[in-house]
Image (spheres, rainbow, N blue to C red):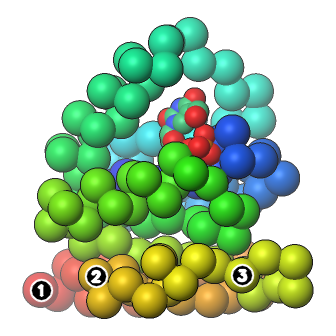
Amino acid sequence: MKIYFSGSIRGGRIDADLYRDLITELKKYGQVLTEHVGSSALKEELSDREIHDRDIQWLHEADIVIAEVTTPSLGVGYEIAKAISFEKPVYCLYRENEETRVSAMIKGSPKVTCHSYNKFPEAREILCHIFGIRTRQ
Ligand SMILES: O=c1[nH]c(=O)n([C@H]2C[C@H](O)[C@@H](COP(=O)(O)O)O2)cc1CO
């Protein structure tokens, strides 16, 4: 199972540690193609074009896309739209808060399954549920 984890980079790194913890959890279910998204010392050596083309290739290869969308990010939104067009299953996790609301273009998409959570253990349960369901299919 190849997992594409999507999380904000240039949109803001406030949740980077959370992404790292989610990636650690996701590694129980398969190979995470985008482990760098959770790195606290993230420094891509590639050009923007190379990053784009690599990530699109990974999206093609992925069996599932999991995105943490609490921090709004153009790149994450773009990856979600691409994943939908590639007919990949897309799941978004987000924390409800008063400062940011998830875009209606994500929450309102019939092709995206969204789950809200408060603390990390709840996110872990959601992932368990998602992968429990998918491995039974
Ligand atoms: O350096 C990068 N490496 C990279 O893999 N990405 C991809 C993976 C993330 O899920 C997503 C983040 O987009 P953004 O940087 O617009 O927040 O884009 C994005 C960047 C920088 O835009």
Residue drawn at 45 percent across, 41 percent down: 34
**Which numbered disc covers residue 137?**
1
Disc with the residue nearer the chain's start (2 vs 1): 2
Please tell me whether mark 2 sits on a helix, a strand or a loop: loop
Along the horizontal axis of the image, is 37 left or right of 90? right
Please tell me whether mark 3 sits on a helix, a strand or a loop: loop
Q: Tell me the quadrant of the picture where the N terminus can be found.
A: bottom left
State the residue in front, 67 or 98.
98
Disc with the residue nearer the chain's start (3 vs 1): 3
Disc 2 to disc 1, C-alpha distance: 18 Å
Residue 15 % position (x, y): 77, 56
Please tell me whether mark 1 sits on a helix, a strand or a loop: loop
Q: Is residue 74 above or below residue 104?
A: above
Residue 130 % position (x, y): 37, 83
- Identify the residue under disc 3: 101
- Identify the residue under disc 2: 111
